[in-house]
Image (tube, helix red, strand yellow):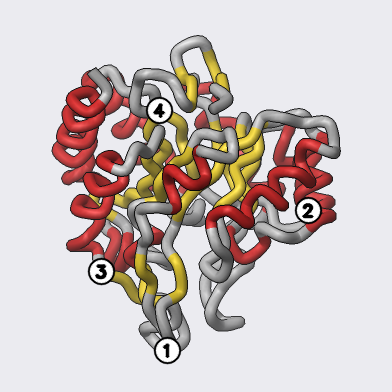
């Protein structure tokens, strides 16, 4: 399995748990993004956990046209640059169209391909050509071994810096399940695997015009993923998820992040002695 280096102390597939975390979307109130990033840096620094900040400038895959999408790419990237510069944090953010790849790459250390778009050839090629690390989220609709086809589009475009993320599989209407076999299967393709513990508890379309979720299962699934061999964990975190404009029901409270991160790190270290 390839090791993917972001910085000297942040390596996916190494012997340390990597955590990627932050709010689902950047909000008009920039203080939410900045305070969340600052607190998460404080927590992970204290725990000795390599940390990457995540937030989206646009959430294009919304249930309804009326759903909150974010602040847009120009403003959003400016805010992410502020986080990167002032807090000295590496950045992960989504792209949804090929034209966004080069713009986002000016700020982001990792370009994320959303799960619904994991087979979009032009998007994958554009991300690959930036030379940045590309995190491909496994589609809710495909088998884990099929992710090799998405990876090949990156490889054939001259980039071998690839991470996979497991985030659940469609199970009937409005529900997801996680097949933990997906983690070792995708690792067997040669790439480190991150587990998205918060999107995996989504109930797609469960609130009619928006997605619902079951936050109470986030920690349980994170532990299961570590037991299955996950190299990294992904959490969406918010100071007050119930008031967040998107993905609130599956985001964890910022006040609970330290306890969850500490226990996950302890379990990872035990399993990887």
Question: Label 2, on which residue?
Answer: 123
Q: CA distance from mark 4 to mark 3?
A: 25 Å
Circle 4 crowding by C-alpha within 10 Å: few under 14, some 14–19, many from 20: many
Q: Mark 3 touching mark 1, by CB under 8 A? A: no
* Lower sequence index among marks 3 and 1: 1
Residue at label 4?
51
Task: Say left or right for 168 vs 157.
Answer: left
**Is residue 88 shown above or below 116?**
above
Spatial CA distance of label 1 from label 2 is 29 Å
| 3D distance between C-alphas at marks 1 and 4 | 34 Å
Choose between 260 and 195: the one closer to the eye.
Answer: 195
Query: Sequence order check: which comes first, mark 4 or mark 3?
Result: 4
Quadrant location of the N terminus? top right
**Residue at horizontal 58 percent and vertical 65 percent from the top:** 142
* The C terminus, quarter of image: top left
How packed is label 2: few (under 14 Cα within 10 Å), some, or many (20 or more)? Answer: many
Q: Secondary structure at mark 3?
A: loop
Q: Residue at x 56, y 70 (%)?
A: 141
């Amino acid at each position: 399995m390839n090791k993917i280096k972001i910085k000297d102390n942040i390596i996916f597939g190494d012997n340390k748990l990597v955590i990627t975390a932050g709010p689902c979307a950047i909000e008009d109130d920039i203080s939410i993004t900045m305070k969340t990033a600052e607190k998460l840096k404080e927590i992970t620094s204290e725990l000795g956990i390599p940390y990457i900040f995540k937030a989206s400038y646009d959430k294009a895959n919304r249930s309804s046209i009326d759903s909150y999408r974010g602040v847009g790419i120009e403003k959003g990237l400016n805010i992410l640059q502020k986080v990167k510069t002032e807090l000295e944090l590496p950045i992960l953010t989504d792209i949804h169209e090929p034209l966004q790849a080069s713009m986002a790459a000016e700020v982001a250390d990792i370009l994320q391909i959303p799960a619904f778009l994991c087979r979009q050839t032009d998007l994958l090629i554009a991300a690959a050509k930036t030379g940045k690390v590309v995190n491909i989220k496994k589609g809710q609709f495909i088998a884990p071994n099929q992710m090799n086809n998405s990876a090949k589009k990156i490889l054939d475009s001259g980039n071998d810096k690839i991470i996979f993320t497991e985030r659940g599989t469609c199970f009937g209407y409005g529900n997801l399940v996680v097949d933990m076999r997906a983690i070792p299967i995708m690792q067997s393709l040669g790439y480190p695997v991150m587990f998205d513990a918060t999107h995996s508890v989504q109930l797609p379309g469960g609130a009619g015009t928006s997605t619902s979720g079951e936050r109470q299962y986030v920690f349980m699934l994170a532990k299961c993923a570590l037991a299955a061999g996950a190299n990294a964990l992904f959490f969406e975190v918010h100071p007050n998820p119930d008031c967040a404009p998107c993905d609130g029901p599956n985001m964890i409270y910022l006040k609970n992040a330290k306890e969850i991160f500490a226990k996950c790190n302890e379990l990872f270290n035990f399993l990887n002695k």
